[in-house]
Image: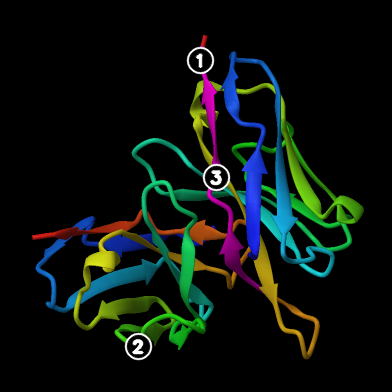
Amino acid sequence: EVQLVESGGGLAQPGGSLRLSCAASGLTLENYDMTWVRRAPGKGLEWVSYIGSGGTTVFYADSVKGRFTISRDNAKNSVYLQMNSLRAEDTAHYYCARVDYDILTGFSMFYFDLWGQGTLITVSS
Amino acid sequence: EVVMTQSPATLSVSPGERATLSCRASQSVSSSLAWYQHKPGQAPRLLIYGASTRVTGIPARFNGSGSGTEFSLTISSLQSEDFAVYYCQQYYNWPPWTFGQGTKVEIK
């Protein structure tokens, strides 16, 4: 079965750190850009971070810039999100998502065609 | 940043009825608009991209339309499995990629 599986969620104290992992099974992530998206309680989806297929192009939402770091290990077919200096407002379900790309051209399509089920991060003292 | 605004926040519909969800962008996003369905405890699912292209395997009752700043998602005859939260997302001007706040489609 083709799926993305997030792990690493849990309870963290304000100012603490967590590292999320997103592992792919049934598919290879190597050619795909990847993103993290979160949904805070009672709120909608919020894009968090993006990493290009090569791992060198990265973007962050202003709300996490300087605190979160996205990375990938194509050999392990995985993407990661290192979360430092956590705040209460980071409490959310975090989803990894694959960015679709055109097989014929190799160009990224920039919408998110496959998502994981998410992992919950709770930041509280 | 492109701000996406969805309406209504909640839509109460009876099974078999038609539902129309709206999405407005604060500036033109051309046709770079996607719709996602999200059910509690599940992975969000891409339904529509390019404003109107249905993903393979998505039932034909889901139809997207619009361009520029005004978009809509119509579910022609709601089935029980369609009750969920629906999000629009622009991917024209990024980063950031931006989502609407969601429309919850609930059983009337």
Q: Residue at x 67, y 55 (%)?
A: A35
Q: Is residue A112 magenta?
A: yes
Residue B25 x %, y %: 41, 68
Q: Is residue A120 magenta?
A: yes
Q: Chain of mark 3?
A: A
| First in sequence: mark 3 vs mark 1 | 3
| Magenta span | A109-124
Q: Chain of mark 1?
A: A
Q: Residue at x 89, y 55 (%)?
A: A56
> Residue A79 bears which disc, if any?
none
Q: Which residue is mark 3?
A: A118
Q: Nearer the viewer, residue A2 or A36?
A: A2
Work out how far the residue at label 1 is from the one at label 2, CA to CA, in angstroms: 44 Å
Q: Is residue A76 above or below residue B88?
A: above
Residue B31 x %, y %: 50, 83
> Residue B60 bears which disc, if any?
2
Asked if the residues shown at circle 1 and circle 2 are in contact, with their CB atoms under 8 angstroms apart, the answer is: no
Work out how far the residue at label 3 is from the one at label 1, CA to CA, in angstroms: 19 Å
Per the image, label 2 sits on a secondary structure element best described as loop
> Residue A124 bears which disc, if any?
1
Per the image, label 3 sits on a secondary structure element best described as loop
Q: Same subunit under labels 3 and 1?
A: yes
Q: Same subunit under labels 2 and 3?
A: no
Choose mark 3 or mark 1, whichever is in front.
3
Q: Chain of mark 2?
A: B
Q: Residue at x 35, y 88 (%)?
A: B60
In the rendered image, the quadrant that contains the N terminus of chain A is bottom right
